[in-house]
Amino acid sequence: MKLVRTLLERRLIACGTLFPGARSLYRWQSKIADEREVVVLLKTRSARLDSLQNAFSELHPYKVPELLALPVSAGLGKYLEWINGETSLALT
């Protein structure tokens, strides 16, 4: 997926995990939509969130793309250090 690769190249995320085959039902412009989608889990740190949001809005084809930030309360220290290291030199 080009979006995830670009976010990786800009070092805004450390990893993007794609879950193909998702199905979303939602209301859009007064109609019920039923769409197949790919859910993407992006791993970054809170310090990169503003830049990630800007890049996501720039690169995503939807008028209203879904981007939710979920807090991480704990994790394997080495993994969290890796995320921090991969996103420390972000190119914005």
Image: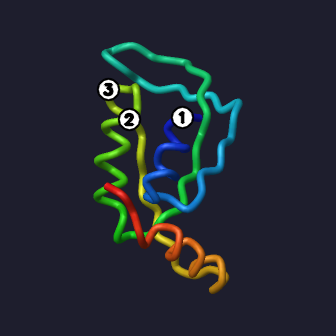
Which label's residue is closer to the chain start, 2 or 1?
Answer: 1
Residue 49, numbered label: none
Give the residue pinned by disc 3.
63
Where on the picture, by quarter, is residue 66?
Answer: top left
Callout 2 environment at 10 Å: few (<14), some (14 to 19), or many (20+)? some
Depth check, mark 3 against mark 1: the one in front is 1
Callout 3 environment at 10 Å: few (<14), some (14 to 19), or many (20+)? few
- Picture coordinates of residue 71, whole percent (x, y): 46, 69
Above or below for 49 versus 68: below
Q: Nearer the viewer, residue 14 or 46?
A: 14
| Quadrant location, the C terminus | bottom left
Outermost residue, bottom side = 77
Q: Amino acid at mark 2?
A: Leu
Q: Is there CB contact under 8 Å for labels 3 and 2? A: no
Give the residue pinned by disc 2.
59
- Left-right relation of 21 to 38: right
Q: Secondary structure at mark 2?
A: helix
Residue 2, numbered label: 1
Where on the picture, by quarter, is residue 63?
Answer: top left
- Left-right relation of 49 to 79: left
Residue at the (60%, 75%) spot, across then down: 82
Question: How far apart, in angstroms, are the residues tagged by discs 3 and 1?
Answer: 17 Å
- Picture coordinates of residue 44, whole percent (x, y): 48, 64
Which label's residue is closer to the chain start, 3 or 1?
Answer: 1
Callout 1 environment at 10 Å: few (<14), some (14 to 19), or many (20+)? few
| Quadrant location, the N terminus | top right
Residue at the (66%, 83%) spot, across then down: 78
Q: Is there CB contact under 8 Å for labels 2 and 1? A: yes
Q: Amino acid at mark 3?
A: Lys
Question: How far apart, in angstroms, are the residues tagged by discs 3 and 2?
Answer: 11 Å
Q: Secondary structure at mark 3?
A: loop
- Left-right relation of 85 to 12: right
